[in-house]
Structure formats: structure tokens, C-alpha cells
Image (spheres, coloured by chain):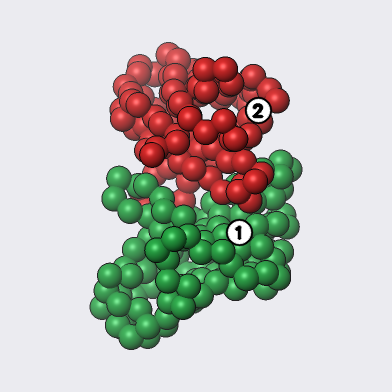
Amino acid sequence: GAVVSQHPSWVICKSGTSVKIECRSLDFQATTMFWYRQFPKQSLMLMATSNEGSKATYEQGVEKDKFLINHASLTLSTLTVTSAHPEDSSFYICSARGGLAYYEQYFGPGTRLTVT
Amino acid sequence: DQQVKQNSPSLSVQEGRISILNCDYTNSMFDYFLWYKKYPAEGPTFLISISSIKDKNEDGRFTVFLNKSAKHLSLHIVPSQPGDSAVYFCAASDSGSNYKLTFGKGTLLTVNP
């Protein structure tokens, strides 16, 4: 139980284009979903928090117009990187809160984005 | 200000022995504590959690101990297996911040055959 998927697992796009990443909770309803970006030494930086049907809350320093988050249902959240640039190349990971214990978070496998 | 600290960047143990990973926190508002295992280029895998109303939680080979007065928790893995080799992250959250996780910097566990 408590499985979270991400799609795609990797994507290459050209500078200036937009890319959408999906995050789904497969066997539970996610009250809250989170989006992270991975940095060196595997540390994770929280980008934003989203609750179903509400606007996402972005962390300080994260451009909300660049990283669009939509949480349309209790099982799906999407992150759209708009007008991507090479510096946006990174490993993006989502997590979902819910399942058996309301405070537990389960992570997706991640999406590798490369902007050329 | 690092609110969750894992002071040991690495730990090496022999297969079959106990692995003890430690974590300290400073924010007394934290209610929930979680341990994750992570490999490069993968999302963290949830291992075990504990809420602040408990002092111990056990799941198979994994046991988490919480000492609230010392603001300290530990993860015990018994017996350790080579497949346990990974980076382990301690994380904490509280309901007031929408359960956002605050992570430690991780401990690289190596289990030698």
C-alpha cells in the first residue's frame, strides 16, 4: 500500500518549452501533495505544498509563475515547468500525505528533467 | 538553523549486527518523526514513523525510539543486511505546518558482508 507514481520518469526538453510532470497516489487519497527538487548529496528542497482544490503554497525563493502546480483531485497533482532553462535541469520528486497514518508521507520515484 | 540533525555522515557495520542511526531535533513543535531510506536518483522510501505520544515503534527489523526530553530519536536495524546499504534520512513534521517535512542531512549506512 501507499504507492506514489510519477510520470514521466525522465524527460529531455528544449530551452523555452514547458514540461508537465504528474504525481499520482495509486492506492490512497492524498490530502496533501508536496513537490521537491533534489540537490547534491541527495538533499531535498521543498518547492511547494498543495491541497486538493486549493492553490499551492510555495516556499520562499520558488517562482510560482515558473513552477505551476495543480492539485485537481485527491490522487493527482501536476508540476509544470514553464519556459524551462538549463538551470531547471534537476531531479524532481513528489510526495503524498495520507494513507493509514495521516502524517506519513510517501514519495514518488522522481523525474529527471534535462533542459538542452 | 538546522532543526533536524544527523551528526554522523556515515556508518559502517557488519552484516548481522545492529545498525543504530541517530537524529536530534531542536524544534519542540515537532509531533511526528519519520525515517526514510534513499538511493541515488530515486525517491525516498518510507521505513517507519513515530508520533510524539509514543516512545517506541517497531516494524520487522526496524525499531524507532523517541526520547522527547532529550529531543533525540534513533533507528535500530536488526539484523543488518547488505541490502540495507543506503542513505538514511530522519525527518520531522508538525500539524501546524501542514505536515511539511524537515529533513536531516542523512547518514550513509554501509553494511559489509
Q: CA distance from mark 2 to mark 1?
A: 23 Å
Residue B106 sits in quarter: top left
Residue B91, placed above or below residue B96: above
Task: Label the red chain with its letter.
Answer: B
Residue beneath the point at 57% across and 30% down: B28
Label 1 environment density (alpha carbons within 10 Å; few <14, some 14–19, many ≥20): many
| Residue B29 circle label | none
Query: What is the x, y in percent for residue A27?
Result: 70, 55
Say if residue A76 shows up in the picture: yes
Circle 1: residue type: Met
Q: Position of residue B56 (x, y in %)?
A: 64, 20
User: Can residue B87 be seen here?
Assistant: no
Residue linked to disc 2: B52
Q: Identify which residue, A35 or A22, lies in the foreground.
A: A35
Q: Chain of mark 1?
A: A
Residue contact at pointers 2 and 1, CB within 8 angstroms: no
For this orientation, the residue located farthest to the bottom is A16
Q: Secondary structure at mark 1?
A: strand
Provide the secondary structure element on which disc 2 rests.
Answer: loop
Q: Residue at x 69, y 57 (%)?
A: A30
Chain in green (letter): A
Name the residue beneath numbered marker 1. A33
